[in-house]
């Protein structure tokens, strides 16, 4: 049986760890060539690329584009097209977080979160769409968040950025709906990733409670299942959104949050 995405080229931003890496590996497992991007020392990145090549026998490359720099993002898309012949599937996953009251929120943190969590998706999509339009097929998958649909205190920049990403998803989807391209957002609840690990430590410090209590009573308080969403679950949803079965799913934001936004 053939691989579902054999010969396709996938660019995943923020993919040297966490959800992004999980998504990249899931597409590679289905035959896609993948371009990684994100933080990491050269040795660690080489190890990730080597593992993908060894495990799935596809091409795997890395581009170090800084997600706050539009020209570097455009270059990353161009290099992916040069190396793989296309960017068939773009996964805008890069994100950072900072927890602080609005009146104490560092301005530079606000600017960085908006740039990386929201504007980078615009810049990457802007660069990738001409090729998708030319080929008459493409998939843009934006990693939003439950915080793209509802809010929590002390996360004003993240919530604003993710709400913006949901809005961008809708608008972009309407523009390309007749050109074989879909644009959708995935809205996970809490997934155990490095960014969430840091939140747990931050919240433990802010609230002065044990880490285990933070996980159940703070982090997973809004998540009715009281379980973290698995990276594998998010990756499986991304694969579905890129599949022929999802051709009529467009401009929507799909929650995968243990029931959080059902409240």
Image (cartoon, rainbow, N blue to C red):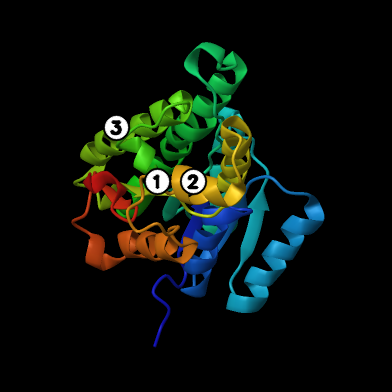
Horizontal and vertical percent for residue 137? 32, 55
Q: Secondary structure at mark 2?
A: loop
Residue 197 point in image, percent of width and height: 60, 48
- Residue for point 52% across, 52% down: 12
Vertical order, 111 against 215 (above or below):
above
Residue drawn at x 64%, y 53% as measured from the top left: 16
159 shown above or below 173: above
Label 3 – label 1 distance at C-alpha: 26 Å
Q: Which residue is mark 1?
A: 221
Distance (Cα) linking label 3 and label 2 = 16 Å
89 shown above or below 172? below
Residue 13 visible at all: no
State the mark number for residue 93.
2
Whichever of labels 1 and 2 marks the residue nearer the N terminus, that label is 2
Q: Residues within 10 Å of mark 3 (few under 14, many from 20)?
A: some
Write the residue at 53% across / 48% down.
213
The residue beneath circle 3 is 167
Mark 1 or mark 2, which is nearer to you? 1
Q: Nearer the viewer, residue 238 or 152?
A: 152
Dot 3 or dot 2: first in sequence order is 2
- Label 1 secondary element: loop
Query: Which quadrant holds the C terminus?
Result: top left
Q: Return the disc, 3 or 1, that comes first in the chain's sequence.
A: 3
Given this view, does label 3 or label 1 mark the residue nearer the observer?
Answer: 1
Classify residue 251 by image quadrant: top left
């Amino acid at each position: 049986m053939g691989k579902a995405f054999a010969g396709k080229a996938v660019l995943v931003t923020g993919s040297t760890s966490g959800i992004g890496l999980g998504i990249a590996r899931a597409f590679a497992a289905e035959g896609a060539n993948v371009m990684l991007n994100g933080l990491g020392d050269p040795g660690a990145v080489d190890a990730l690329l080597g593992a993908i090549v060894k495990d799935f026998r596809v091409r795997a490359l890395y581009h170090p584009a800084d997600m706050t720099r539009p020209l570097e993002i455009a270059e990353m898309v161009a290099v992916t097209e040069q190396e793989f012949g296309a960017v068939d599937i773009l996964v805008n996953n890069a994100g950072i977080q900072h927890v602080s009251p609005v009146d104490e929120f560092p301005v530079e943190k606000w600017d960085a979160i908006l740039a990386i969590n929201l504007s980078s998706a615009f810049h990457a999509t802007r660069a990738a769409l001409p090729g998708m339009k030319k080929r008459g097929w493409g998939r843009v998958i934006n990693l939003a968040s439950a915080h793209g649909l509802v809010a929590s205190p002390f996360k004003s920049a993240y919530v604003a950025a993710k709400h913006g990403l949901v809005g961008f998803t809708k608008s972009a989807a309407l523009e390309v709906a007749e050109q074989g391209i879909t644009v959708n957002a995935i809205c996970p609840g809490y997934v155990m990733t490095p960014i969430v690990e840091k939140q747990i430590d931050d919240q433990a410090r802010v609230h002065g409670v044990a880490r285990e209590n933070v996980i159940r009573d703070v982090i997973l308080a809004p998540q009715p299942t009281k379980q973290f969403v698995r990276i594998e679950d998010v990756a499986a949803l991304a694969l579905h959104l890129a599949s022929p079965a999802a051709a009529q799913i467009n401009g929507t934001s799909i929650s995968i949050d243990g029931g959080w936004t059902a409240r």
